Image (cartoon, rainbow, N blue to C red):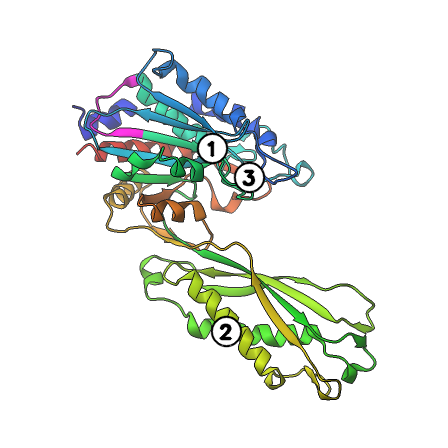
């Protein structure tokens, strides 16, 4: 049976030439895997085909090696790929999951280089998907290829799951949600699951929940030269939102566990968009809508927050005349006309945050591997959302997360990753496999 040291020696370092060649093929497909329905529906099988070209020679499919490959498709041209390197000890397993084969959109006119072809600038590998997440697809493909090629005798089964449809959930039943529903990942619950779709080479141990909200405010339209005959919905929205935010921060303050998990921020509620129906500059509009989101650390319950926000709005409507005005004729009630301003709140699709298990063996081996290969370990948490991870956690998977692209270029123009970071990521994976042999 292979020892921890011998496993690392057998797996060695990342084959840079092979990795860059494969990544070049994947980035060459990135134009066709942009995910923004209904205009852009990705064809993830374009990526699958290149991964299969790399791995099939070492698979049971061709007889050339031990890799067991399962190409699972729920929608035409939108496949997932499950690749398994069998171990010798039943029930002993680890997995690398979350390497998604779709990308966010890119407008070539806004970029300094072609987003849809790989270009190299020193250590920089440039193109849409290099950081998120085609770089990880290529990286884990190279790991599985090396396992298939060198055939180390491992106790643990090593599984890689390349998924479709991570960047947009408007078309359900395509990716990891469908794989879980069909039970195809059930055996991964027997060991740590490493979700490889974050950045900056450190364990990401916490993410936020998201509650998108819309605050619709109704006033009374009137000429701006006669403001005393209007109910200004813009002013009402500003005052109401200020009060709602104050109550939110009172009821959902910074949680003590946020320090343990190194969250960059506490839970927040803020506006991000403002809409009104249009009209002249001399016209006070009759309505407006302010939209935004709550980003919630995982130590608070999304349902509790939604209930509280509705309570705030109900109370404000019942006491709308008590809200501060904005000047001597600013008011939200016109008694002579029996009119009151009104606020309603609605919510779009919500998701809950994640707090990874800090007592998990998976967390400890990830930290040790990171310290060994990156030189230091500093787990972090952010209130960005990864709803797929929460769904896996709720299903009983021990999810840990990491990634080897750059947070600074995540979903950004001029996206790139560093080849040196990917080389370190490969060695982290090898160290994880080796440690879990002990």
Whether residue 293 appears in this view of the structure is: yes
- Measure how far apart labels 3 and 1 are at the Cα level: 11 Å
- Asked whether 369 or 279 is in front, the reply is 279
Residue 269 image offset from top left, x and y in percent: 51, 65
Task: Look at mark 2 in the image and give the residue it sits on.
Answer: 311
- Measure how far apart labels 2 and 3 are at the Cα level: 43 Å
Whether residue 331 appears in this view of the structure is: no
**Secondary structure mainly formed by the magenta segment:** loop
Q: Quadrant of residue 363?
A: top left
What residue is at 44 percent from the left and 37 percent from the top? 178
Left or right of residue 293: residue 400: left
Element type at marker 3? loop
Task: Give whichever of discs 2 and 1 has the lower sequence position.
Answer: 1
Q: Do the numbered discs 2 and 1 sit on residues whose CB atoms are within 8 Å? A: no
- Asked whether 258 or 74 is in front, the reply is 74
Task: Look at mark 3 in the image and give the residue it sits on.
Answer: 415
The reply to whether the magenta stretch includes residue 157 is yes
Label of residue 199 in the image: none
Task: Give whichever of discs 2 and 3 has the lower sequence position.
Answer: 2
The reply to whether the magenta stretch includes residue 85 is no
Alpha-carbon neighbours of circle 3 within 10 Å: few (<14), some, or many (≥20)? many
Question: Which residues are the magenta region?
Answer: 150-158
Residue 358 image offset from top left, x and y in percent: 27, 51
């Amino acid at each position: 049976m292979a020892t921890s040291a011998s496993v690392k020696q057998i797996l060695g370092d990342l084959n840079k030439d092979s990795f860059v060649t494969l990544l070049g093929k994947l980035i060459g497909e990135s134009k066709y895997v942009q995910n923004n329905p209904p205009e852009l529906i990705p064809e993830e099988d374009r990526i699958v085909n290149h991964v299969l070209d790399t791995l099939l020679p070492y698979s049971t499919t061709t007889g050339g090696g031990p890799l067991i490959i399962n190409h699972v498709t729920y929608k035409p041209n939108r496949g997932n790929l499950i690749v398994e390197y069998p171990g010798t000890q039943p029930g002993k397993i680890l997995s690398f999951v979350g390497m998604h084969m779709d990308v966010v959109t890119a407008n070539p006119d806004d970029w300094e280089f072609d987003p849809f072809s790989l270009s190299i600038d020193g250590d920089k590998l440039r193109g849409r998907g290099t950081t998120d997440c085609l770089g990880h697809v290529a990286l884990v493909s190279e790991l599985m290829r090396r396992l298939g090629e060198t055939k180390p005798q491992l106790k643990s089964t090593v599984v890689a799951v390349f998924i479709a449809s991570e960047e947009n959930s408007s078309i359900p039943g395509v990716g990891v949600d469908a794989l879980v529903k069909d039970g195809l990942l059930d055996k991964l619950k027997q060991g740590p699951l490493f979700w490889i779709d974050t950045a900056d080479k450190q364990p990401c141990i916490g993410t936020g929940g998201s509650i998108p909200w819309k605050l619709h405010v109704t006033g009374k339209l009137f000429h701006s030269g006669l403001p005393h005959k209007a109910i200004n919905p813009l002013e009402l929205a500003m005052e109401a939102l200020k009060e709602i935010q104050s109550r939110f921060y009172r009821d959902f303050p910074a949680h003590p566990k946020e320090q343990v998990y190194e969250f960059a921020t506490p839970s927040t509620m803020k506006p991000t968009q403002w809409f009104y129906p249009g009209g002249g500059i001399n016209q006070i509009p009759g309505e407006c809508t302010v939209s935004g989101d709550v980003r919630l650390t995982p130590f608070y319950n999304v349902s509790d927050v939604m209930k509280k926000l509705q309570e705030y709005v109900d109370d404000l409507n019942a006491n709308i005349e008590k809200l501060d005005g904005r000047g001597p004729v600013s008011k939200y009630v016109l008694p002579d006309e029996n009119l009151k301003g009104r606020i309603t709140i609605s919510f779009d699709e919500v998701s809950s945050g994640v707090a990874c298990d800090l007592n998990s063996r998976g967390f400890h081996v990830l930290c040790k591997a990171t310290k060994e290969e990156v030189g230091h370990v500093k787990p972090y948490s952010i209130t960005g959302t990864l709803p797929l991870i929460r769904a896996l956690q709720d299903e009983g998977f021990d999810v840990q997360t990491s990634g080897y692209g750059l947070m600074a270029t995540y979903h950004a123009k001029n996206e790139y990753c560093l080849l040196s970071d990917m080389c370190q990521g490969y060695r982290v994976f090898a160290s994880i496999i080796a440690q879990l042999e002990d």
